[in-house]
Image (cartoon, helix red, strand yellow):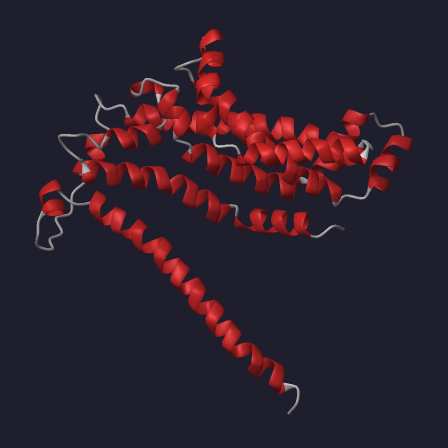
Amino acid sequence: MASRHPSRGHAPGRWIAGAILAGAGVVTVVPLIWMAIIALQRPRAIVSPDWEFEFSWDNFAEIFAPDAVFGTQVVNSLVLVVAATALTLVVSSFASYSLSQLRWSRRTVLAILTVAGLLQVIPPMTLVPGLYVTLLNYELVGTLGGLILLNTVFNLPFAVIMTKFYFDTIPGELRESASIDGAGELRVFRAVMLPLAAPGIAAVAIFTAIQVWNEFLFGLVFTAGGTEAPITVGIAALIQPQEIKFGAMAAVGVVTAVPIILMAIVANRQIVAGLTRGAVKG
């Protein structure tokens, strides 16, 4: 009988946790469903005071018309995500491996991590004037290359901090054993340490990709819009003083949200494994 009391005690807590999760799920899913419904309606049904549903693909046909720029902007965003995420992972993997395994002094590691952490709390808007002048001098304003560099720089501190935690979970004896067997530092990193840190690096890659995909400020400031801009800027362009294209905006929103949702679903196990491994030192 006594053994049943703990389970009874946990029942209210589980019920509350379940209710909170259910509420969070509703708050997250309902706007997405409503956006999809608007995207599949005719414009007159959207603004009608009465509830009407007139199924139509017109909004998607509008955003992917030959003279529309949204298709190009989606491609720009995809290129931006792939390039910035890959560059961030390469640099952060080498940097975090060095900080974790190459026996830097504690003071040096603490100073680097402190600076990296402080960079995360600086509002990007305060750095825009200096960044604009820098990119202008190198003729990178209005180019995907400039956006790739900016997104890499601003996501790198978080990636270095998180990836270092994953490398910290790997016993240093593995590196020493491989070095004794004659393996060079680069081979040890590539063949031994990198595969063991793969779940954590995958989690960092997913978070970085989401951040880059959703980025708006740099695309707005450092491009002239149109075919130069990512899709986030294209969505904002649909809000004009004379008209707000709710149907087209919802259609672009669906196209923009689907890749990230699919990525999170497919990579769910990698995210959980990476976060768990980084949280508990082996």
191 lies left or right of 81: right
Identify the residue at the far front of this view: 126
Q: Position of residue 158 (x, y in %)?
A: 59, 36
Identify the residue at the far right of this view: 180
Give the answer, above or below, for where 159 lies relative to 36. above
Q: Nearer the viewer, residue 172 or 195?
A: 172
Residue shown at 68%/35% (left/top)? Answer: 113
49 lies left or right of 211: left
Q: Nearer the viewer, residue 56 or 91?
A: 91
Judge whether residue 243 can be spotted in this image. Answer: yes
Residue shown at 57%/31% (left/top)? Answer: 119
Q: Nearer the viewer, residue 197 or 28?
A: 28
Judge whether residue 196 can be spotted in this image. Answer: no
Residue shown at 54%/36% (left/top)? Answer: 121
82 lies left or right of 91: left
Q: Position of residue 257 (x, y in %)?
A: 36, 41
Q: Position of residue 191 (x, y in %)?
A: 75, 33
